[in-house]
Image (cartoon, rainbow, N blue to C red):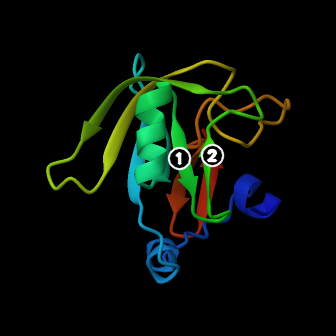
Amino acid sequence: MSSALEEGLDLALDWEKVAKIGRDGHHVIPVVLQDADSLEVLFVGYANQDAFEATLERRSAVLYSTSRNEIWHKGATSGDTLSLVDVRVNCEQNSLLYLVRRDGGGACHTRDANGDTRPGCYYRSVVDAGHMSFV
């Protein structure tokens, strides 16, 4: 990801993301990762069947990277793993909710102005159709 996309305040939503995933033949479903205590939504990822089964086995969030085409154990490199508290499935069984606890400092791969890992990926608020502000 580019620094401008992750750190900038110009709104540039990726309306093609889901279409790209389908075109690339990924067999995944969205996973919302939410802090089990505060109920803050940390981020949205994707899981294929192998990542889902690994999550249940490890009791820690394992996802599928649609950009790298690989399974990744969240926090394996950074230390910011997410312990699994509960898994919930939606009514249509086409998305998951992982209730988790942060084992490290944060959940997002980006860092704030102080260089600290952000606690979640929703750190900007939409001001209007073209701009955001930091929360």
Q: Quadrant of the N terminus?
A: bottom right
At label 1, counting other C-alpha atoms closer than 10 Å, the crowd grade (few under 14, some 14-19, many 20 or more) is many
Q: In the rendered view, would you say 26 is above or below 118?
A: below
Which kind of residue does numbered mark 2 sit on? Answer: Trp
Residue at 32%, 32% in the rendered image: 87
Residue 83 in percent (x, y) is at: 51, 22
- Outermost residue on the left side: it is 91
Residue 104 in percent (x, y) is at: 67, 20
Q: Quadrant of the C terminus?
A: top right
Can residue 131 be seen here? The reply is yes
Residue 15 in percent (x, y) is at: 48, 75
Residue at 63%, 49% in the rendered image: 133
At label 2, counting other C-alpha atoms closer than 10 Å, the crowd grade (few under 14, some 14-19, many 20 or more) is some
Which of 100 and 40 lies nearest the eye of the viewer? 100
Contact (CB < 8 A) between labels 2 and 1? yes
Which of 81 and 14 lies nearest the eye of the viewer? 81
The tag on residue 63 is: 1
Mark 2 lies on residue: 72
Can residue 34 be seen here? The reply is no
Residue at 44%, 77% in the rendered image: 22
Residue 49 in percent (x, y) is at: 40, 52
Q: Is residue 135 left or right of residue 115?
A: left
Q: Is residue 1 left or right of residue 65?
A: right
Which kind of residue does numbered mark 1 sit on? Answer: Leu
- Ranked by sequence position, the earlier of labels 2 and 1 is 1
Tag 1 secondary structure: strand
C-alpha separation, residue under disc 2 versus residue under disc 1: 5 Å
Residue at 34%, 39% in the rendered image: 97
The tag on residue 19 is: none
Tag 2 secondary structure: strand
